[in-house]
Image (spheres, grey):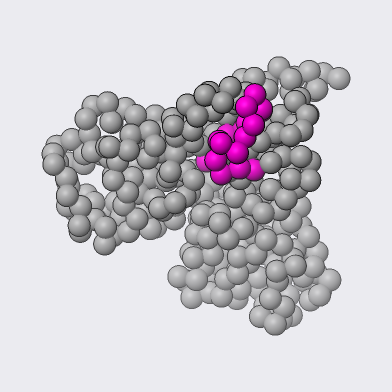
Amino acid sequence: MKIILAAPRGFCAGVNMAIESLDLTLRKFGTPVYVYHEIVHNQYVVDQFRKKGAIFVDSVEEVPPDSVLLFSAHGVSPEIRSAARERNLHALDATCPLVTKVHLEAIKYAKLNYTILLIGHEGHDEVIGTMGEAPEAIILVEDEQDVDTLSVEDETKLAYLTQTTLSVDDANRIIRKIKERFPKIESPPKEDICYATQNRQEAVRLLSDDADVVIVLGSQNSSNSQRLKQLASERGIPAFLIDGPQDLEMEELNTDQTVLMTAGASAPESVVQQTVECLVAKFNATVELQTIREESVHFPLPKPLRSFAAELNSD
């Protein structure tokens, strides 16, 4: 077996920032620390933090008054922030800056009385948070069929935004359809889909032609991980989305295959390496790293944690 290990893969800058934020919050305030929704969409990461004393909640009402609450990387609506204040919670915000950018764009267009078409998946944490910024102004568009049924009062005041973790190809198909119906629609000054999402998809697109099988490390509720699996499947290549080596379907694998391995933006590198080691042991696999592009993006910690982090680093 030959393993092509795709790069870039795994943690993006937003996930790194969110995970470091939760780790520092636990160290600074002690347990329990409450987190609104999963800190990132990865079961391994969530389980590790549960063991350290983090408590993940789906409602602010689950958090005792005066407690410490961290908002996850996917962002929250103003309603959630208000609810946290009402309970006198010490709230820290680990929202990815790229998600914050979409929130700010939604607020800007809503103030200008625009109708906003948000391209994304219903129920995703990021979509819920973004729509919460201006619910009366935003219409969710999930696929090309939704475009056909759109009804807009004023086509001269129309804009679109996108969830940051979408498939680039899927988003572009929907955007093309929207522009056909509404040629004057405005778009954000810089596209919303995250750089890391695009880079990981590009790596699968470029490297999968040489593979018999694609293995994506990531959780089932990770939108960007699902898109990596989908991208390989659309190219006619068997693809598997797994949390770790325990989920490998060994009967689908053999020593004659070339396996492309990548990881979604919330999957830890440690799990990637465990999976590689499993295949090396089972199939005597060799490993070849293929780097499509370098990443050097870094996001700063939330302000309340920066000085604490500096103190730890100086010790």
Mark yes or no: residue 186 visible.
no
Residue 61 among magenta residues: yes
Image position, residue 310 (x, y; %): 75, 19
146 left or right, relative to 315? left
Rendered image quadrant of residue 62: top right
261 shown above or below 123: below
103 shown above or below 225: above
46 left or right, relative to 277? left
**Residue for point 33% across, 34% down:** 134
Rendered image quadrant of residue 91: top right
Q: Which residues are magenta?
A: 56-74
Q: Please state, as top left, top right, bottom left or bottom right, where the C terminus lies in the image.
A: top right
Between 72 and 202, which is closer to the camera in this rendering?
A: 72
Q: Please state, as top left, top right, bottom left or bottom right, where the N terminus lies in the image.
A: bottom right
Image position, residue 142 (x, y; %): 34, 55
250 left or right, relative to 301? right
**Residue for point 66% across, 36% down:** 34
225 shown above or below 86: below
Q: Residue furthest right?
A: 315
**Residue for point 13% across, 41% down:** 153
Between 80 and 216, which is closer to the camera in this rendering?
A: 80
295 left or right, relative to 130? right
Image position, residue 167 (x, y; %): 44, 55
Mark yes or no: residue 307 visible.
yes
Residue 144 among magenta residues: no
Tally of marks:
0
Between 209 and 170, which is closer to the camera in this rendering?
A: 170
**Residue for point 54% across, 65% down:** 229
